[in-house]
Every structure is written in structure tokens, then in C-alpha cells.
Amino acid sequence: MDAAPLIRRAGNFEARALSIEGPLLIAARRFEDRRGQFQETYSRRDFAALGIPEEFVQDNHSRSVPAGTVRGLHFQTAPHAQAKIIRVLRGTILDVAVDLRPGSPTLARHVAVELTAENGLMLYIPAGFAHGFVTREPETEVVYKASAHFAPACEGGIAWNDPALGIDWGVAPEAAVLSEKDRKLPRLAECGPVFF
């Protein structure tokens, strides 16, 4: 997992930098008492102050029953490229973002962070990245915000286990649970240029 130095605070949120410029690890303050806890999970004003300028227009919620479920690596191209904010409601995931930005000095490199219901961390991924995750626990639920609506004509993907990406998912290929669509995704070298 990447080291994450603190770079900004705003309201009840802190943003930490990762090894690739762009993605941010977001921590939100939790308020606890004998009733339980309360946590603000999004504030457009505070996220803008953290350096996240996008307006988010769609929320998605996935539930993965078996541990070892892999979703991704997915992206959308212009004019519907998506920034995302990912968090876990239940369980644990290894969340991965792969840099696909043309001309980026970190092209084809990735960041990977563990997000859990317990740690309450969120990952912000700007447009120009492929995104995917693997569940570490059964019955894991993930929610994420997207800055553009789903657009089938602009969707793309990369094989989760492309050896050129060097991602340690922590699950053997034969044990991973994937959709048929994700099983057929090409390797990065077979994709050609991706435009954001």
C-alpha cells in the first residue's frame, strides 16, 4: 500500500497524496458516542478545497458476495470520462487505479490502497485512470460517486491481471471471481491509445 503524506485539510476531511499525482486518499472525521457514530462522507465545498473540482452526478453501489471478487479494470473516455470517489460500506477491498493519461510520466503505473468499512477511507481517482478492486471479505459493499453518467459508447477496460501492470491483487487468477465481460478485457498493449 502506498505511503500517504497529508497534503490538505478542509472541514471534516483530510487528503493524502499517493505515489502517482492525481489520486488522493481521503479520510473523514468520525463522531462517536454511545449511540454509535456519524460521519460526513461528501461536501462539494470541502472536496473542492482539497483539490477535487469535479461535480459528481451519479452514485453507484455494488455488493460482491464471495471474497476474491474482482471488478475492473474499467474506464470511460471523453466526452464522458469519469472521476470517482470510492468508499466501502461493508467489508474490505484492495482498490486500484491505473494511470492512462497520455503523456503522463507515470503512464501504466498504479496505486493500490486498502479501503474498509472500519477505516472509513475513500479514494479519489481523477479522469484518465482505469479503476478496479478485489474484495477481501465476503458480502462486501462498495459505493462510489462518478463525475459523468455511464456511457456505453465510451466505456473501456483492461485485463485485471495484465502482467505489464504488475498489480499484486492478492488473489490467484484461478480463484478470482469475475464477470464474463471482465474476463474478456484486453491487455493494455492491445488497447491502442486511450483518449481522455
Image (spheres, rainbow, N blue to C red):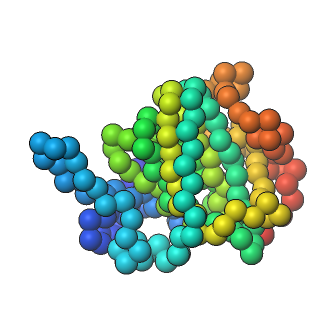
Q: Quadrant of residue 13?
A: bottom left
Is residue 37 placed above or below 6 in the rendered structure?
Answer: above
Q: Residue at x 56, y 29 (%)?
A: 65
| In this picture, residue 95 sits left or right of residue 39 | right
Q: Residue 28 placed where, x, y %?
A: 31, 58
How far across and down, in percent of the image, does residue 101 sit?
69, 66
As drawn, which residue projects farthest toward the top?
174
Any part of residue 93 in sight: no
Position in image of residue 22 (x %, y %): 53, 66
Residue 99 image point, x, y percent? 65, 59
The residue at the point 22 percent across, 48 percent down is 37
Q: Residue furthest left?
A: 34
Q: Measuring 28% from the left and 56% from the top, which residue is drawn there?
A: 39
In the image, is residue 61 above or below residue 64?
Answer: below
**Image quadrant where one finds the C terminus:** bottom right
Viewer-closest of 78 and 64: 64
Q: Is 191 placed left or right of 59 in the picture?
A: right
Q: Quadrant of residue 128?
A: bottom right
The reply, left or right, for residue 144 in relation to residue 151 is left
Which quadrant of the figure has residue 185?
A: top right
Residue positioned 53% across, 70% down in the render: 56
Q: How many marks?
A: 0
